[in-house]
Amino acid sequence: MQIYIKFLTSIYFRSLFYVLGVMISLVFILNYLGELDFFQKIEIKTHFTIFLALLNSPTMIFDMSPFIFLIAIQIFFIKLFDNSELVTLKYSGLKNSKIIRILMILSFLTGILIITVFYYFSSNFKNLYLELKSPFTNDGKYLAVVTQNGLWIRDKIHENTLVINSSIIKKNYLIGNFITEFDKNYNVIKNIKSDKIDVSSKKWLIFDAKVYEGNNYENYENLIIETNFDLKKINSLYSNLSSLNLFELFELRQNYKKLNYSITDLDLQLLKLASLPIFLVMMSLFSSILMLRIKHLSNTTFQIAVGLFFSVIIYYFNNFFYVLGSTEKLGVFLAIFTPLIILSLVNLIMLNKINEK
């Protein structure tokens, strides 16, 4: 039995690395073409675009991991079919269910490795990618972060810069605010203090504002300032959660809770990571059953095409529930685990009489 496990493990990882190599090449080419398109009007060195494409690739590979596993398991069985090794294993007493069990264990362990090691590097590479590319985008003009000291926003209006600090967010209001306005040479023009700001639109309505200019100050019952931020933009501060590793995600979640900020997207990302090993197991099981049921089809290309077809369906199905969770139309737990439960039920139905295949 030990020999068979080593044999199957060897084929499993060879299949996985083969598919991974193909996907990395395709993702890199697509990323590189995307960077060339982005920089077509900017004079930039070729090695810089290549470097950016490389930095952005691991995140995309991570997102594609369930479908990489599905195709890898297909390749695994195709190798067994081609050499009639599946028949040999069956006559040696190794049933299909035992082979599938080995694949599921390998997928689970690999999934643990992916979220603890691979994701750490991919998130850091993504963060570096965003930092290197930000000077060529408009993102450098206005930035927003959440820290233990609340919400911090840097905004650029014409030649002046605003730095805004708020204690908490309540619905469409920023509470406990201090705003400093700088000129283009970063000399302080004025400071504004207010307990409440309506950020429903990009024209902020400041209530009971105290405006300090030099040694003088004035009180305003209502004051309007123009910004590049509204509630919608503030609520999507971290659209690139893939640039944060696990420790940073947990720290950000704590800061968000203190600020009374929505933690829905963070919880979705954390649950997505936590459930990945289970997702990989379910995809491996699905692919195994699928291959054993269509093994009579001698056309390898058609077998792979069937796998790709189901990959697309599962991707959109999974993404549909993720969007429902992100828009808070469905609970975070249900948004992540409903597709897994449905996939598990499909596997359970298909698993019937699998040893006879």
Image (cartoon, rainbow, N blue to C red):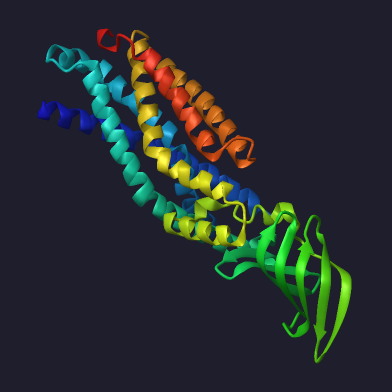
196, 12: nearer the viewer: 196
Q: In terms of image quadrants, where is residue 353?
A: top left
Residue 236, x across and y down, in percent? 65, 52
Furthest toward the bottom, the residue is 215
17, 246: nearer the viewer: 246
Does the image show residue 47? no
Which of the image's four quarters has the C terminus? top left
Does the image show residue 338? yes
Residue found 59% across the figure and 46% down from its top: 34
Residue 182, x across and y down, in percent? 75, 79
Q: In terms of image quadrants, where is residue 327?
A: top right
Image height check: is 59 above or below 315?
Answer: below
Which of the image's four quarters has the N terminus? top left
Residue found 69% across the figure and 57% down from its top: 234
The answer to whether 267 appears left or right of 95 in the picture is right
Residue found 31% across the figure and 20% down from its top: 78
The answer to whether 14 appears left or right of 322 in the picture is left
Q: In terms of image quadrants, where is residue 317?
A: top right
